[in-house]
Amino acid sequence: MHGRYQKMQKSLLLQEESHKAINDRGRKMQNNILIIDDDMGLCQLLKKCVEKERLIADLAYTGTAGLDMAAKGSYQLIVLDVMLPGMDGFQVLEKIREMSAVPVLMLTAKAANTDKVNGLRSGADDYLTKPFDVEEFIARVLSLIRRYTTFNGSDKESHLLSFQKLTIDLDARIVHIGDSQVELHAKEFDILCYLARNQGRILTKQQIYEEIWQEPYAYDDNNIMGYISKLRKQIESDPNNPTYIQTVKGVGYRFSQSNGMKSRG
């Protein structure tokens, strides 16, 4: 009897491990999002909404818990509230950007633009003000995930863009200057790719904004200028005299044609 009991235990353990492995593979194949908000009722509502779109949603009710889950999990999007107990949303965003370029959709209860501007400059990819329409929330979530997975190159030919010391890996979403890897968040990487793929062409702020954010231009030049400034600090040897991203006064920006792009598949 004892031996039979041990065999049953072993069989059950193997079944549990098999189910866990299947579930883990399922999570990797699906789009997973993390929602960080201290409003438990809202979290549960948003979770139900995204699950109808066949997304998997994990919930965290504090900034500390959310940051821990973000570090350990694999997510295609993080929804982050500004007003959190303890570590606030901006602090959490700063930590996330130190380790990941995952898209971040920030939520705020404030009607003023201050939080929106601060969030976007800190590395957020999009913003919603509470209370918001659930359908708009879902549309923004799906748009951010679609752009993120598209830029990851899952359905594209693998290739690199090379410009002198600058190398852009479109599949891995990694940028190198020489042998050093440059840490860019999602929007910075997307802007750099858009400019690089249009090498030599002058792009207006409106063109850049509408391509990257996929919404009508709000004529907020400071937003685009802020991202360009950050990019230059990351990739230019002298940000005040840029080699790659050049300003065309009164028009927009141009990725220098003199760098000679090489696309390798």
Image: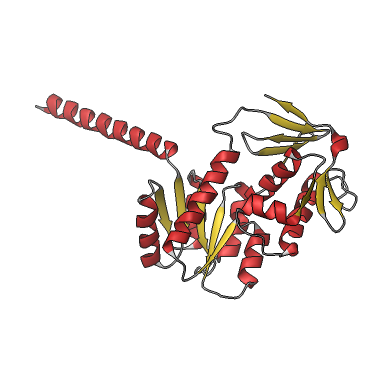
Q: Is residue 5 left or right of residue 234?
A: left
Q: Does the rendering let one see residue 63?
A: yes
Q: Residue at x 62, y 33 (%)?
A: 171
Q: Residue at x 63, y 28 (%)?
A: 158
Q: Quadrant of residue 166?
A: top right
The percent coordinates of residue 47 (x first, y second) are: 38, 56
The percent coordinates of residue 121 (x first, y second) are: 68, 61
Q: Does the rendering let one see residue 71?
A: no
Task: State the quadrant of the N terminus.
Answer: top left
Q: Quadrant of residue 27?
A: top left
Q: Is residue 123 left or right of residue 129?
A: right
Q: Is residue 84 left or right of residue 42?
A: right
Q: Residue furthest left?
A: 1
Q: Nearer the viewer, residue 11 or 249?
A: 249
- Residue 237, compared with residue 50, is above or below; it is above
Task: State the quadrant of the C terminus.
Answer: top right
Q: Residue at x 60, y 62 (%)?
A: 91
Q: Residue furthest right?
A: 241
Q: How many marks?
A: 0
Q: Nearer the viewer, residue 244 or 24?
A: 244
Q: Is residue 201 left or right of residue 53?
A: right
- Residue 30, compared with residue 67, is above or below; it is above
The percent coordinates of residue 153 (x first, y second) are: 58, 34
